[in-house]
Image: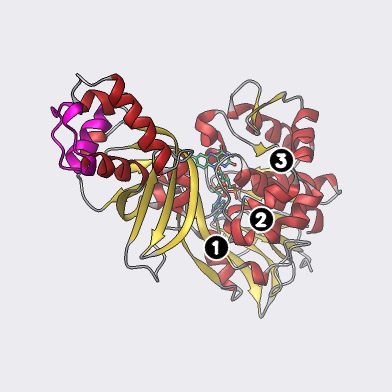
Amino acid sequence: MCSDFTNSRDLISGQNKAMKTEIVVIGAGPAGMMAAIAAAECGKQVIIFEKNKSAGKKLLLTGNGRCNLTNAVNNSNLVAGFYKNGRFLYKAFAQFGSQELMDWFSGQDVPLMIDDNRVFPKSQHSADILKALLDRVKSLEIEVYYNSPVLELIVEGNLLSGVRTATRTVFCNSVIVATGGLSWTKTGSDGDGYRFARQVSHSIVKPKPGLVGLELTDNAQSGLTGLTLTGIAAGLYCDDLLVAVEKGDMIFTHYGISGPLILNLSRFVANEKCKQNYLVLDLFPDQSVESLQHQMILIIKENTKKQLKNVVSLMVPERLADFILTSCNVKQSTQVSQLKRSDLLNIIRFMKTWQLPISKSRPFEEAMVTVGGVSLTEINPSTMESKICSGLFFAGEVLNLDGRSGGFNLQAAFSTGRLAGIKA
Ligand SMILES: Cc1cc2nc3c(=O)[nH]c(=O)nc-3n(C[C@H](O)[C@H](O)[C@H](O)COP(=O)(O)OP(=O)(O)OC[C@H]3O[C@@H](n4cnc5c(N)ncnc54)[C@H](O)[C@@H]3O)c2cc1C
């Protein structure tokens, strides 16, 4: 319950103001703004505290500045985008799924476009998504306090009564923690939400970087930097166990590997039970070894006078052709007519099962999401309220939820934010 303080009464010093409201939202990211909007639309008095000098710093970076705000699939497919933890989101998506989110932004005069199920503002500017949210915040007269990091929750026993910033003590009925996780920390999400959760004894699933590039154990591939491989498949192994498979595109970078396929696999890397992670790449996932061998023999027959390097370059980019032949200990200058059968089989084996040992993920500063966070078993999925501390709600990436790339993570932030705002 709210304590009976009047607005702006001096408390400890002349600067520390005591205020009263119904709901405090911590964080003006997508989850926090949507939570505040939903609460205000339900007629509740709500204020937002934001650590940065402006809202939605990370939102502006999304989709390379284009903001891939959701994925136009049904709720079951949205849920599937969140791996084992997706089931937690059924209720939030049933209440506010991708269609409802698209309708909401269209209703705010933001035309949208869909590209291969990925939904963007038609303008291709994430700033338009942020502006729509802020316009709605303003029209609902929600006060946003910028440069105002919340320092702690005010809790006695397990009774939540408000929050404290450096200059304000705010008493309220409910607090919605929408502080994000630990990813791309310079945008403001630096783990404060976990601290608030721990204050009331919530457990935190150890956070690690997700949707992030991977470093390789050696630099044998350094000559491939900048090379993109499209339409390949990769299996991620933990020791001898296959843990995940993806199809898509990847790129060699100065530190190792990245690209959509790698980002989606990265959440499975660095499992503590695993001594060595490695990838097995299949450069021709739609062809069996036999059909690839058949194709290569045909190409060889048509190019008998060429050097092997030039023939392999007809199948893969030239730089990769050099790399494959070196890795298979075959001279680049070999005339194809003189190619030994065992070398041909080695080249094909390499193309179908290229092993890349991984040393680690790139750091949180480069991660698009956080894998881990506030344990879902302690949160009510119908309301987003803590099962430990009544009146405390969580929304967005602070929760132990991480989705595939393609708009899933913003959808989860909006859906959980909306549900928390309605129920708080
Ligand atoms: C480069 C990049 C690109 C991405 N692209 C996409 C994409 O295209 N599509 C997609 O679905 N997802 C994308 N994501 C992921 C997506 O941006 C996040 O999942 C989403 O922003 C999470 O929303 P949130 O509101 O939970 O947290 P955040 O967006 O991190 O917002 C949290 C807010 O809380 C504030 N805060 C933190 N602590 C406090 C405190 N103590 N007091 C007050 N305020 C505080 C922070 O300053 C911040 O403003 C991308 C992420 C990155 C880094």
Q: Earlier in the sequence, mark 2 or mark 1?
A: 1
Which residue in the structure is indicated by mark 2?
395
Amino acid type of disc 3?
Val
Circles 3 and 2, Cβ within 8 Å, touching? The answer is no
Q: Is residue 271 left or right of residue 357?
A: right
Q: Secondary structure at mark 1?
A: strand
Amino acid type of disc 2?
Ala
Q: Secondary structure at mark 3?
A: loop
Whether residue 339 is in magenta: the answer is yes
For marks 2 and 1, give the CA distance.
Answer: 11 Å
Q: Earlier in the sequence, mark 3 or mark 2?
A: 3
**Where, quadrant-wise, is the N terminus in this rendering?**
bottom right
Magenta stretch secondary structure, dominant: helix
For marks 3 and 2, give the CA distance.
Answer: 22 Å
Q: Which mark is residue 73?
A: 3
Disc 3 crowd rating (10 Å Cα; few below 14, some 14-19, many 20+) is some
Disc 2 crowd rating (10 Å Cα; few below 14, some 14-19, many 20+) is many
Q: Secondary structure at mark 2?
A: loop
Whether residue 350 is in magenta: the answer is no
User: Which region of the structure is painted magenta?
Assistant: 318-342
The correct choice, above or below, for 65 with respect to 199 in the image is above
Which residue in the structure is indicated by mark 1?
373
Circles 2 and 1, Cβ within 8 Å, touching? The answer is no
Q: Is the C-beta of the residue carrying label 2 under 8 Å from the nearest atom of ligand 1?
A: yes
Circles 1 and 3, Cβ within 8 Å, touching? The answer is no
Q: Earlier in the sequence, mark 1 or mark 3?
A: 3
Q: Residue 46: percent from the left, percent from the top?
A: 75, 50
User: What residue is shown at x 78% (from left), y 66% (from top)?
Assistant: 2
Of circles 3 and 2, the one toward us is: 3
